[in-house]
């Protein structure tokens, strides 16, 4: 399926639910809405669906999707797209939702930066972290080596085949990629400024096991302070808390310190905001604006966990309330797909 940028149009796209964000939670919302016979149209600034899973780590394995012992991020997106095919959602890709405006009839008008208009009684904001940038280590000349040995995301693991790779970080991404690339890279080194890791305990244990087997070099209480090379990265300066500076030859340096989220235009829509996230009611993940829901990583509430499976749950409950908004005169009758199937709904 090709998701080409839309042509400019003066026509207003009308639907039941406008979904802002084509990440996994936004895509699954299409499925849950489709079960209720609600039509959806997706808006996303990226050219392809999938959000971070497609853009940042399509080859990264995900282990906490129910029923899937392990699935690559890109494959999860493909499966979600296949799952929602029967419901024929609309797409406006390579466009940012710029503004929202409440209409006299209670519906919402969403306009993109190029002026494409979308009208619906319900909006789901599933924008993940919003627009995001990698957190870069404070190394003076790091920009000179970006795409020449310094990568902030692992988009294609095969490029590290037979290469010397240094990963820096202490979270899940750093641990997961160290484990994954241990089977691909010629040499893999993980550097962390502390001895404790923020990632999952199981991942920490797997890394320690690889260290014991000699397949991963682990350097803790240290950080990278310098990069050297002639047009391409060749060497790193490692500063250890007690042992001082040393040089580490390498082909690739992958600092994985997380992302800096930015809400962008969403911050100006009059929504309740707390620390770059949208506050919601956990009854159905509604925001303070009637007919607007926030699901997935974009929202916040007491006990919030930023997991894909939690976003799936939020999307499911939001769709139940969305049905009552779209069809206030109809009674919602819950049905199991094991009884009705998909086509029969």
Image: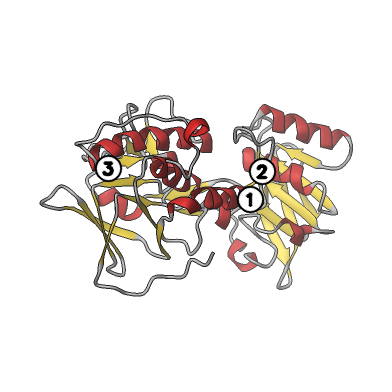
- The residue at the point 43 percent across, 25 percent down is 303
For label 3, the residue is 292
Specify the label residue 75 is tagged with: 1
Specify the label residue 342 is tagged with: none
Q: Position of residue 92 (x, y in %)?
A: 39, 63
Pick the residue in front: 150 or 273: 273
Pick the residue in front: 125 or 91: 91
For label 2, the residue is 71
Q: Position of residue 130 (x, y in %)?
A: 41, 50
- The residue at the point 44 percent across, 48 percent down is 261
Count of numbered tags:
3
| Residues at circles 2 and 3 in contact by the CB criterion of under 8 Å | no
| Residues at circles 1 and 2 in contact by the CB criterion of under 8 Å | yes
Tell me if 271 is positioned left or right of 247 in this view. Answer: left
Crowding at mark 3 (Cα within 10 Å: few <14, some 14-19, many 20+): many
Pick the residue in front: 302 or 308: 308
Quote the CA–CA distance across marks 3 and 1.
Answer: 30 Å
Tell me if 57 is positioned left or right of 3 in this view. Answer: right
- Specify the quadrant that holds the N terminus: bottom right
Tell me if 98 is positioned left or right of 23 in this view. Answer: left
Q: Is residue 247 visible?
A: yes
Residue 293: image quadrant is top left
Q: Secondary structure at mark 2?
A: strand
Q: Secondary structure at mark 3?
A: strand
- Residue reaching furthest front? 344
Q: Position of residue 107 (x, y in %)?
A: 19, 50
- Specify the quadrant that holds the C terminus: top left
Q: Which comes sooner in the sequence, label 2 or label 3? A: 2
């Amino acid at each position: 399926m090709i998701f080409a940028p839309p042509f400019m149009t003066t026509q207003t796209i009308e639907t039941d639910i406008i979904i802002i964000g084509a990440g996994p939670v936004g895509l699954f919302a299409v499925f849950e809405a489709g079960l209720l016979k609600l039509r959806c149209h997706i808006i996303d600034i990226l050219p392809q669906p999938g959000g971070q899973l497609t853009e940042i780590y399509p080859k990264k394995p995900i282990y906490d999707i129910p029923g899937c012992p392990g699935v690559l991020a890109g494959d999860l997106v493909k499966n979600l797209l296949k799952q929602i095919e029967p419901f024929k959602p609309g797409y406006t890709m390579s466009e940012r939702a710029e503004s929202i405006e409440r209409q006299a009839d209670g519906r919402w008008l969403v306009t993109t930066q190029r002026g494409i208009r979308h009208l619906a009684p319900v909006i789901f904001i599933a924008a993940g972290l919003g627009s995001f940038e990698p957190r870069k280590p404070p190394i003076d000349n790091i920009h000179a080596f970006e795409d020449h040995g310094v990568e902030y995301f692992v988009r294609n693991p095969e490029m590290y085949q037979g290469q010397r790779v240094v990963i820096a970080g202490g979270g899940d991404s750093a641990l997961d990629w160290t484990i994954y690339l241990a089977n691909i890279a010629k040499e893999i080194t993980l550097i962390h400024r502390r001895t404790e890791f923020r990632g999952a305990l199981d991942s920490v244990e797997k890394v320690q096991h690889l260290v014991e087997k000699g397949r991963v070099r682990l350097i803790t209480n240290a950080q990278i302070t310098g990069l050297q090379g002639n047009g391409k990265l060749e060497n790193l300066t490692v500063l250890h808390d007690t042992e001082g500076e040393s040089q580490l030859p390498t082909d690739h340096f992958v600092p994985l310190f997380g992302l800096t989220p930015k809400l962008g235009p969403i911050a100006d829509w009059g929504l309740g905001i707390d620390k770059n996230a949208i506050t919601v009611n956990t009854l159905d993940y509604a925001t303070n604006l009637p007919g607007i829901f926030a699901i997935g990583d974009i929202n916040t509430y007491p006990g919030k966990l930023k997991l894909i499976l939690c976003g799936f749950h939020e999307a499911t409950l939001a769709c139940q309330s969305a049905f009552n908004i779209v069809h206030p005169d109809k009674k919602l009758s819950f049905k199991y797909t094991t009884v009705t199937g998909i086509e029969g709904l």
